[in-house]
Amino acid sequence: MKIESNSPPATNRLQPVHSQKVDVKTSEAKVQPDNRLNRQTTQKRILHWFSQAGIQEQGSTFKTVNTSEKIRRKNELLAQKKFRNLENILGKALDFCLDDGREEDLDPDWFFSFIKMAEEIFSPAMQELWGKIFAVETARPGSFSLKTLGVLKQLTQKDAQIFRHAVNLASRRKGEATPKLLLGYYQKTSLWSFFSSHNEHQLNLANFGLGYPDILSLVDLGLIHKSEIESGELPIGESIEWRCAGQTVDLQAKRSGTTLVYYKFTTTGAELCKLVPQKRQDFYLKSLKATLGIAFDIT
């Protein structure tokens, strides 16, 4: 009698467990088609990009074509793409054409090295950059070294975007060709500054969209020097003109022992700066003035 009275509750306890298993299977059935769809989408993207290089999935098409014919077709496709790359770059160069009255000839070695590298530039944005380079070099031979072209060829669109932003934050002292990323200043220890809590005052470039990882990327690419640099000690009261972030400012050191701190662009970086039109960076300049204003008179 006792066993009979306990049986129904046992059955009731099993029912929720059974229904839970059914729910799990149902949810799995819903998830699996989504996973298969995502996988198929990814596979299509993979096939698309390999097809750009003339590579097809093994056994999917052209089953009767031998390997030699596949290689020939691949090489022909790539050759056509490289030729179109050069045509596009030529068009960009003609659009950007400069005429400064000079009639100097290009170095033939430079030209054919340019062609060899430029034919492998597939991105439209980078093709525009290479077109500008050729236009400038044609008007002013010697503007861009082969080393600079080699560095430029390594740039991805993301690298180019980081570099463009760095150029927008760059400053150039009047009479100097190499731009710099001004960070702040440093004051040498003296009796006057002994009681000061800070001798070094610097901006954090990450606050202006150029984080330390971006700086490292530019260093690795050989576009800026690795270490922060201090200028020579600036004379008191002497006005020095700077072009900072698209605006002109005059700096006068208030006391001796004051130096500017900055990242300096390399020769390659300075050459590529010519290609980037600089835009005003008001927030950066306002912050820079606030930092430098402690040690400099700014007009």
Image (cartoon, rainbow, N blue to C red):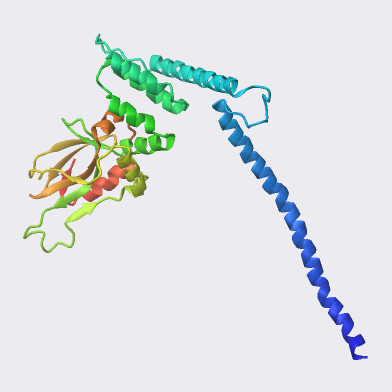
Q: Which residue is more in the foreground, 242 or 26?
A: 26
Give the left or right position of residue 131, taking residue 23 as reference.
left
Q: Which residue: 44% across, 17% down? A: 86
Q: Quadrant of residue 46?
A: top right
Q: How many marks?
A: 0
Q: Which residue is more in the foreground, 296 or 162?
A: 162
Q: Which residue: 68% across, 22% down? A: 64
Q: Assign the C terminus to one quadrant of the image.
A: top left
Q: Is residue 100 above or below residue 270?
A: above
Q: Which residue: 63% across, 35% down? A: 44
Q: Is residue 22 above or below residue 141?
A: below
Q: Which residue is more in the foreground, 63 or 75?
A: 63
Q: Assign the N terminus to one quadrant of the image.
A: bottom right
Q: Is residue 274 at all visible to an observer of this figure? A: no
Q: Is residue 80 at all visible to an observer of this figure? A: yes
Q: Quadrant of residue 273?
A: top left
